[in-house]
Image: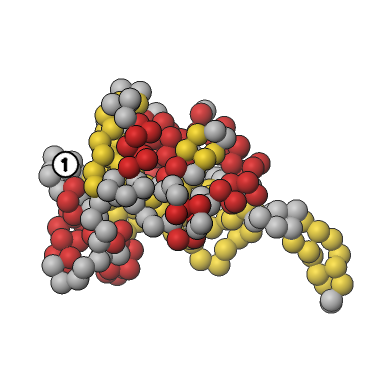
Amino acid sequence: MKIVILAGGRGTRGKPFTDYFPKAMIPIEGKPLIDYIVKYASSFDFINEIIILADYNGIGNQIRRYFEDRKTVRGKKIRFVQDSNSGTGGDLTHLSAILKNERSFILWFVDNFCAIDLGKMYKSYKEKESIACIATRRYRKEETGYAKVRNGIVTGFQEKPFVTMPMAECLGIYILDTKILKIIKSKKERRSEVNLSFDVLQDLSKRKTVSAFDIGKALWMDIESPNKVERNQAIVKEIIRKMKN
């Protein structure tokens, strides 16, 4: 099975840092974000190839240069593919030839930092017989402290608690049937950009063919900028520890 790491985003939330390096290269404990994701993905036996989709004509070429001396990681081949700047779904269409012998593949948006159990997620995807499986969560570790208030009086404080969200939050890690590539291609014929969630998965969810894999209270971070990494050192270090287990 192949994993596609989508690393071609413009990183607008990370400016001005991402004017000089892509999100994939945000430093974490002395290594770029993408290094952790590639090594973690390669630790799963059923993954045999890592495809990094990025804009290598721009600052994304920093990613290729970082890996240029390593053709493989833990015996898993690394392949670099130029993106098409046609949306989170549209960028996948030119992977059809690479994925032609695959029934499904993993898609990982590079700014998602989480030691998700891909083996359990794949098992869930197969059991649900879905065309797509999305990693989700109902619990979120807050960055700030909360006050317990009763009748306008603060009765206590809770430091950075887990909170339960009213709806499941969609995370940027998916398992997709390769049939989705044909659906995306047909939509791309009518528009220049195709968004995976709203243009493709939204329609499929109405047919009840999209499943969810809840990560429970596993820690997850959206690595949007070096500032966010700095503010959440404890969470970052715990995720790294889980990735190495």
x and y percentages locating residue 116 in the rendered image = 46, 42
Viewer-proximal residue among 10 and 20: 20
Q: Is residue 48 above or below residue 22?
A: above
Q: Give me the residue at 36% from left, 39% from top.
A: 63
Q: Which residue is denoted by mark 1 in the rendering?
A: 98
Q: On the picture, is 3 further left or further right than 187?
A: right
- Count of all numbered marks drawn on residues in the image: 1
Q: Secondary structure at mark 1?
A: loop
Residue 88, percent across and down?
Answer: 31, 58
Q: Residue furthest bottom?
A: 151
Residue 46 visible (yes or no) = no
Q: Quadrant of residue 120?
A: top left
Instruction: Residue at 25% x, 51% y: name it.
Output: 83
**Residue at horizontal 45 percent and vertical 49 percent from the top:** 20
Q: Position of residue 28 (x, y in %)?
A: 54, 39
Q: Looking at the rendering, which quadrant does residue 195 occupy? A: bottom left
Q: Is residue 39 visible?
A: yes
Instruction: Point out residue 158 in the picture as x, y percentages from the top left corner.
Output: 77, 56
The N terminus sits in image quarter: top left
Q: Residue at x 60, y 37 (%)?
A: 237
Seen as rendered, the residue at the extreme top is 75
Density class for disc 1 (Cα within 10 Å; few <14, some 14-19, many ≥20) is few
Left or right of 104 in this view: 223: right
Left or right of 185: which side holds 167? right
In the rendered structure, which amino acid carries the disc numbered 1?
Ile
The image's colour scheme reads secondary structure
